[in-house]
Every structure is written in C-alpha cells, then in structure tokens.
Image: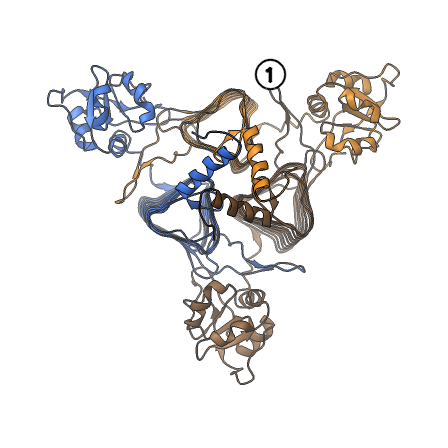
Chain colours: A blue, B brown, C orange
Amino acid sequence: MADPRFYSVRGPFTLAEIADIAGAEIDPDADRDRRFSDVGPLHTADAETVTFLDNKAYVETFAESRAGACIIHPRYADQAPAGMALLKTPNPYAGYARVAQAFHPGEAPEPGIHPSASVEPSATLGDGCVVEAGAVVLARAEIGERCRIGPNAVVGEGVVLGDDTTVGACASLSHCLIGKRVRIYPGVRIGQDGFGFAMSRSGHEKVPQLGRVIIHDDVEIGANATIDRGAGPDTIIGPGCMIDNLVQIGHNVQLGQGCVIVAQVGISGSSKLGDMVVVGGQAGIAGHVRIGDGVQVAAQTGVMRDLESGKAYGGTPSVPIRDWHRQTVALAKLIGRRSD
Amino acid sequence: MADPRFYSVRGPFTLAEIADIAGAEIDPDADRDRRFSDVGPLHTADAETVTFLDNKAYVETFAESRAGACIIHPRYADQAPAGMALLKTPNPYAGYARVAQAFHPGEAPEPGIHPSASVEPSATLGDGCVVEAGAVVLARAEIGERCRIGPNAVVGEGVVLGDDTTVGACASLSHCLIGKRVRIYPGVRIGQDGFGFAMSRSGHEKVPQLGRVIIHDDVEIGANATIDRGAGPDTIIGPGCMIDNLVQIGHNVQLGQGCVIVAQVGISGSSKLGDMVVVGGQAGIAGHVRIGDGVQVAAQTGVMRDLESGKAYGGTPSVPIRDWHRQTVALAKLIGRRSD
Amino acid sequence: MADPRFYSVRGPFTLAEIADIAGAEIDPDADRDRRFSDVGPLHTADAETVTFLDNKAYVETFAESRAGACIIHPRYADQAPAGMALLKTPNPYAGYARVAQAFHPGEAPEPGIHPSASVEPSATLGDGCVVEAGAVVLARAEIGERCRIGPNAVVGEGVVLGDDTTVGACASLSHCLIGKRVRIYPGVRIGQDGFGFAMSRSGHEKVPQLGRVIIHDDVEIGANATIDRGAGPDTIIGPGCMIDNLVQIGHNVQLGQGCVIVAQVGISGSSKLGDMVVVGGQAGIAGHVRIGDGVQVAAQTGVMRDLESGKAYGGTPSVPIRDWHRQTVALAKLIGRRSD
C-alpha cells in the first residue's frame, strides 16, 4: 500500500469497476463485487491490492504473487497463482496506468499565493492557481488556470503558462511560452541563453540569443533538465513529448510530437527530430542533423548525421542497429571471444 | 523580429552603420541609407531585417531568404537573392554577433535589493547592483559594481564577485572568487565539496575539501553545471572560458584561457587543460591528465591519458582523430559494410 | 594554508599528536613536539604544514616539497627531501583524511530558523537545527536533531530527515525518508516522479509513481544529482554510498552498502547494485539489470546485462575489462597502429 505519509487513496473499487477502468476482461466466473483498496507492486501486493505484469522478466514473481488481482496480457494467464483475479488486456501497462490514476488522482492543493512568494503586480494568474512558498513570478508573466508554481520556483518576465501546468520546486523559466498540462519537474532550466558565440583567440564574442522556447501541451520535462532558448528561431518541444532528468536541449532544436528522450541525452543546436522519436539514455545528437519520424536511438549512441524515419540506430558514430550488433560480435571474435 | 514580450530593440540602423558595426564591406552601389529595424533568422527575416549565413548547410535557405540584408562570407555573394543587401566579411558570425548586440544591448535593470531578498549586514555590494526576489547573500560576501543576483540565487559566505558579473536564478555559490563580467546561468553549483574520500569496507572516510574555486574574467558557465572546489589546491577556470550546460568539473581541475567545454562534458579531479582547448559534448576526461593548448576533443570521447598540444582526438579510449575515423571504417569493413 | 575567508583552523598540533590521529608511525629520532598549523597540498605546503602523498604520479613533487611533514606509504620514505618529518602508514589517504578533519572539523552554525525561511506549523524540527534564509519546510516534515537546511532549499510534505543530515542550497526533497549524517549537496532533486508512462501514438499515458526514496545513513549525494522515487516499490540507497554530481538514479533502483557512483552516471529503472560497487564517470546502466557485490564498472561503460560479483567491466556493450582492453589493442592493429 502506498505510504499514507505521501499518498492519499480513493476507493475501494470493485473488480468490475477496475476492469472497466483498465479496459480489461475478467473471467465470467470471477467475483465482480470483490473490493480492492489500492494498487501495489507484484512482490508486496496483498489480497486487497491490484497489481500488474508488463515485463516478462517478472513472470516468476507474478506466479508467486499474493496480489488479489493482476492486470496482465492474456498470454500469461495460465501462470497465475490460485485465487488471483485476472484482468486481461493486450496493454496491461496502460490499463494499470488508468487504475492507478483512479486510486491516486492526486491532491488538488488549496489555491492561493503563499505569503512568502513574490508575485509582481503586472503578472496575471488564472483562477485556482497555487503559488507556493518562496516562489517568484516576475513582471508581465501570464499564468493560466489551476497552475501550480512550486516552492522557490521562478517564472520569468513575460513567460506564459497554459492551464493546469505545474512548475516544480526550484525550477526557473524565462523567455518561453508553455502549453497546457505541462509538467515541469524540480530544478528544470528553460529559456536561458543558448551556447552561442563567435570563437576567437582574442576572446570569444557573445552572440545575443533572441528566440524563445515554445513548449506544446502535455509535455513532461524531468528534474534538472535544461532547454536553451533559440538563437533567433525558437526552440520547440512538440505536444506530448516526455523528457527525462538531466537532458540537455540546445538552441533552435525542434522536437515533433510524442518524442521520448531518456535521461542525460544531449541534443545539440538546430537539430530537428520528427514525431515519436525515442532516444535512449546518454545518447548524444550533434548539431544541425535531422531525425525522421519514429526513429529509435539506442542508449549512449553518438548521432552525427541525418537518420531515416522508422529505423533504429546504435553505436558511435551511429549505424543501423543491426550493424552495431554485428560490430559487437565482430569485435568479440577479433579477440577470440564468443559474443552471446 | 524578436518577440517584444521578451526583447526590446534599439535602432533602426542604416546599412552603412551596420556595415561599420559588423566590420563588413558593402557594394559601392548599395543604398547606404537603407534602414533596418532588427536582426532575424534566414528563413523568417523580412525586408527590414538583417540576417547572416555562417553554415554552408543553409546556403539554399539563404538563396531563398527575403531578408533585406545578410552578413556573409564573400564566397557566397553570387548566390544571393535579388534585392538583398550584402555585408561581406571573412567572419560573418562575429560580425552578426556585434550587429545583434547593437540592436539588443540588453536591459540594465533598476538597481536595488528586492524586499524579499536576504542580504547579511556584513556583505558588501558595489554601486548599481540588483539583488532580485528571494536571493540570499550570506555573511562577508563581497559583490562588485553592477552585479545582478538572480531570483532565489544564493551567494555564500565570503564569496567574492567582480564587477558586472551576473548570477542566474536558483544558482548557488560557495568557497569561490569570481572575476569580472562572468555570466553564471540558472542552477549552476560552484564551490561545493569535491568527491574526496578514502575508500574502505568499513565506511568511506570523508576528506575535508579545503581549496576554493577561482573563476577568471569573462567566463560563461551554463545552466545546471557543477564546479567543485579544490581539495587543497584550487579549482581554476581561466579567462574567457565558455562552459555549457550540465558540465561537471571536479576538484583541482585547471582550465587555461578561452577553453570551450560543450554540454554534459565531465572533467575529473586534478586534470589540467591548456589554453583554447575545445571539448565536444558528453566527452569525459579522467583524473590527473594533462591536455595541451589548442587540443580538440570530439564529442563522447573518453580521455584517459595526456594529450599533445594542437592535436585532435576521438574515441574511447581516445586516439588521434584520424585513427578514430580509420577504426570506424575498419569496423564497417569487418561486417561487410562500406562506411561513407 | 586554507583561505581564512572560507576556513577556520584548529590546532596547532604536535607531530606526535598528528601521528596518533593519522594512525601513522614516526621515526624514533623525529622531533615529536614539532608543531604544525594546518594541512596543505604537496606543492604549496611550507614548514608548518602537513601534506600527504597518495598517487605515485606525484612522487617528484613530493621529493621537492617544502612541507614540514608528510603522510606517506613507507615505500616512498627514501625519496623524502631533507628535513621533512615522515608519517608512515599503509593508508596515507585515510590518515590524511583524519588529520585534515582534526584541523578543520567544520563550523557548527548557530541553531535557529532564519526569518525569511518558511516552516509549516505541522513540521517538526529536532534540537540544534539550522534553517537558512529562504528555505521552505512543508507540512508534516520530520527533521531530526542538528540538521542544516540550506538557503532556498525545499523539504517536501511528510519528508523525514535523520539526525545530523544536511541539505544544500536550492536542493529539493519530496516523498523520501532520509537517514542520519546524510550530506545532500546543492541542487539535488530527490523524490520526484519517475519516468513512467505507457507509450501510445495517441498520447503517452502517465503512470502514477507511488513509491518513495529511502536513503540510509552516511550517504553523500552530489550537486544537481537526481534520484526519482519508486513507481510502486521504493528507490533505495544503501548506507555509506557516495554519489557524485549530476548522477541520475531512476525509479525502483536499489544500491547496496558503500557503493561509489562517479559523476554523470545514469542508472535506469529497477536495476539493483550489490555492496561496494564502483561505477566510473558517465557510465550507463540499463533498466532491470543486477550487478553483484564489488563489481567495478569503468568510466563511459554501457551495461546492458547482469554483471558478476567481484569482476571489472568496460566498453559498450560492457565486457570483462580485459576483453575491453584486448578490443582496444585489436582495433589499433586493424588500422596498423600499435596501442601502448
């Protein structure tokens, strides 16, 4: 059960209600009125808890789980322990997401501005906003409805936030227009100058950075990530992108819709990613490259050229993923090892 | 045109004035009195806007640009669209930097200490300083003239800042002496303990870190970068160094003059870089190595040994850059591919 | 000598006292009453200063040092300059650590809550706590004795801190239980949501993150590092772990006792490390892998599989360290180079 120190819980819900929320099927003979009080992990869940199985590495844990119900792909149904109610769906993780949201919809904090926050008179806040202790909202910022500005966060001059957007503790925003339902995590830096200067032995010459950061709706930006503003064009993050912790996004970069950028990735200036691109952790993308829709880039890859839509790449410099695996095998053979 | 929400603009300037600022030549028959109201990117600039071409990848965009004037290398002059005034110089990016600075010299904010800031009585501030909302200046800090301490930033005890230095939102400084005209971006961490301890199975023994961070004039330090103080010697950043976002600099590291350290680079303890060293993004430098003047390190390189002045390196472990390219070709051949 | 602007110093101590603190032997004919006023680096130490030699790369510097005393391994004793008192021990770095702690035990700041800090009435603070300027302590937080909450730091709702724990400037904590004597550096982010969502073309579905971060005693967490809370299970950092700057630790990760995680390492979700694992800088560990006790992972390694206890690994994808060295040699031969 989730620690009540940090989480409140709705419910209980019946098995039938949960199946409905998850979009899952239950057996005809299951007890539709059986009640569940929370979600929880496979190995600690008890008879009142709903769990899920999404990764085949954990099938054994599933087979021994004491959870009262489990959201699973039908293919694992026959390995369920006795007495467990099964919620079968081809997308168990998405089903679990919705059930967990039902039990834990999140708290709506009391609207208001903490007395220790600083909000400039020319800034505007929509109804239902929360400005927490020590937060700073500078001149002419325009904040939508039901936004939450975390403790000691800073919203810079003229910044625009759409409705239902949250800014985490100690994050800072400047020179940016942010959409609706955007989740900005603690320590994020958005809108500072890009890394732009003309190199010279007599002293590098700073180039004024005159663009903005445009963040579309439903984006998530992880803790301590940095997104520089454009040099002249804008830096653009498309709708629904998920950006993990400590990611660096340089000036003028454009991300399409629904991209997934894993932790510690760096994307250099002026590169453009299509829709639904997935970039694995610690991968680096050089400046001025174009990456097509649906490309998958393995962790730690070094991308120095344009990548074709729909393909997967690995290695430094990046090659098609199969070639990268072949290189690994070839290197193993070179030293008399078998790679398996 | 730059978004007036975030940028004010000086001007207009005539073509002759702009040529003078850029150090560029204009054609004898050009209209020297033609007026321009801003700078802007190649693909969006209009007839009243000055743009620039610095990267040959964008020559096509240049040829179709509607910009009224463009700062270019003379070699591209014959590809200019009709009606565009040309500002020819061998260093178009540096020329653009100066023109953009002329249009956008930046705002000088009203000096003063925000009522929500905390400045200890024993701290001193020079004339013309701005201490923004929620900023904290601790005991005995000495801040020069015209410095700007951003919202919720922290200047630690005894820290010294030279004239015209700026500290970004939510940055924190301790145990450091900072020069003039240094630009510290949001979320930077300077002066915390280095990663120093004597390893032991019975518990790692913390080693007190007793040095400082010395940052010379005209340095730029990117968002969420971290620079640890020396263990006994100092950590030293030479004049004019440009350090990008999320860079890690360990204790006792020394950087010479004008080094360029791209995002997410890590430099381990006690390594020494000469002058004008360029380190590409996500490269790592082991501890206790020496890197000569003018060395260029490719992105994602892993440096484990001393590197000779004036040479370029790539790969992990690092090898001369040509050898790294040859390795890439050799690997491609091993698996029956042609590398191109 | 340490800069008095930043460091106060205890002492002086006699050679005999220092030998006792260091657990080192002195020569029978040494002047046991000779007094020393501070510790300092080999190359700047003077006759009143105690230094140490731990890295054979600095033996020449040692031979020319003017330090009055040096903590060394006995094997280097015969290279000492004349007049230097020798403190011989098999563990000179640990000995130095204790001597430096004796000279520089650190300041105990005056307990109290700064008037600009915000502490919610339902939070509790033990005796001797310091809450610095601009710090925020939210509802129901439980803070032990002699804790120090740095300027502009944020302690979230319900967070628990053990005795003698310090939270650096601008750090933020939520959904976590923290042990005793934990040192959290500036800008650290602990307890935010993990990177959990069900991917879908129609919009990635957020998965509520319902676990916590559990940090055991004597852990150190470097500047701007990020530790996400568990998705359902907890994220756990074992006792005595040393985590460097800008490290990313994903949801559900478990670290055993005494692990050393160097700067910019990323550990993906649900991976489990045993005791005393050392991970070199910028290495990446994929999700759901298990790493045995005492494993050593070289800098920039990419770990995608389970690793056996007590062994060392390097390369991407990771291989036993000797195989990685052989691959390096083989690659050098392939292009007609000798690797040395």
Residue A138: percent from left, percent from top: 45, 51
In which quarter of the view is residue A55 placed? Answer: top left
Nearer the observer, C171 or C268:
C268
The type of residue carrying mark 1 is Ser
Secondary-structure class at tag 1: loop
- Left or right of B315: which side holds A74? left
In the rendered image, which quarter is residue B90 located in?
A: bottom right
Left-right relation of C292 to C24: left
Relative to residue A288, is residue C203 depicted above or below? Answer: above
For the C terminus of chain C, the quadrant is top right
In front of the other: C100 or A270 = A270
- Asked where in the image residue B234 lies, by quadrant, the reply is top right
Tell me the crowding category of disc 1: few under 14, some 14 to 19, or many 20 or more residues within 10 angstroms, Cα based.
Answer: few
Which quadrant is home to the N terminus of chain C? top right
Instruction: Indicate the chain on which mark 1 is placed.
Output: B
Q: Nearer the viewer, residue A133 or C289?
A: C289
Q: Residue A226 placed where, x, y %? A: 47, 46
Look at the image and tell me whether residue A200 can be seen.
yes
- Residue C167 appears in view: no
**Residue beneath disc 1:** B202
Q: Position of residue A312 (x, y in %)?
A: 37, 44
